[in-house]
Amino acid sequence: RDEAGACAVSAHRCEECKQCFLTVDKLDRHRLCCLPDPSGVVVRSEKAFSGYEGVVSSQIRDKWEAFLTSDHGYGRKRRRIGETYETAEAAARAYATACREMLHAEAEAAAQTEAAAQAEAAAQGEPEVE
């Protein structure tokens, strides 16, 4: 399977499938779906002030918020996850849970689209394409 950010050799390697990734955030997003129990996985980011993808400091002093970003429709849209959190780590765990749900939904939608395309090809008498 060809995932975004995958590469042949890197220091960022999945413990489960041994696939390598260019950056730590790509590895963490992969781990959300690959590991059998991803409950402790958070999506780290070297670019974010908080150190975690999707986690920003709140307007409320010493609080954190998590936002899930999607590129569907016109422009990028942010959806807030939960309320405010006491720590960046708590917000990162909430973000990881929402991100895992989003990735699973996207994978399920892609599988349904692929199955529909194969069924349509079979109905027209065309050989399967892989």
Image (cartoon, helix red, strand yellow):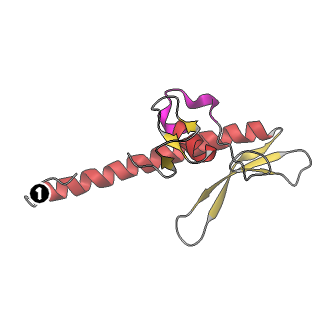
Asked if the stretch drawn in magenta spans residue 40, the answer is yes
From the viewer's perspective, is 105 left or right of 68? left
Q: How many marks?
A: 1
Name the residue rendered at 72%, 45% in the picture. 52
Q: In the displayed structure, would residue 12 be above or below residue 118?
A: above
Image x and y of residue 49, in percent: 80, 51
Image x and y of residue 45, in percent: 69, 47
Element under disc 1: helix
Q: Which residue is mark 1?
A: 123
Q: Which residue occupies the foreground of this view, 46 or 10?
A: 10
How many C-alpha atoms fall within 10 Å of the one at disc 1: few (<14), some, or many (≥20)? Answer: few
In the picture as drawn, the residue positioned furthest to the top comes out as 37
Asked if the stretch drawn in magenta spans residue 123, the answer is no
- Which region of the structure is painted magenta? 32-41
Image x and y of residue 115, in percent: 26, 50
Name the residue rendered at 55%, 41% in the picture. 10
Q: In the displayed structure, would residue 19 be above or below residue 49?
A: above
Q: Quadrant of residue 39?
A: top right
In the picture as drawn, the residue positioned furthest to the left comes out as 125
**Magenta span: helix, strand or loop, mainly?**
helix
Q: Quadrant of residue 79?
A: bottom right
Name the residue rendered at 76%, 37% in the picture. 89
Question: In what quadrant of the picture does the N terminus appear?
Answer: top left
Q: Which residue occupies the foreground of this view, 58 or 24?
A: 24
Name the residue rendered at 57%, 47% in the picture. 26
Circle 1: residue type: Ala
In the picture as drawn, the residue positioned furthest to the front comes out as 9
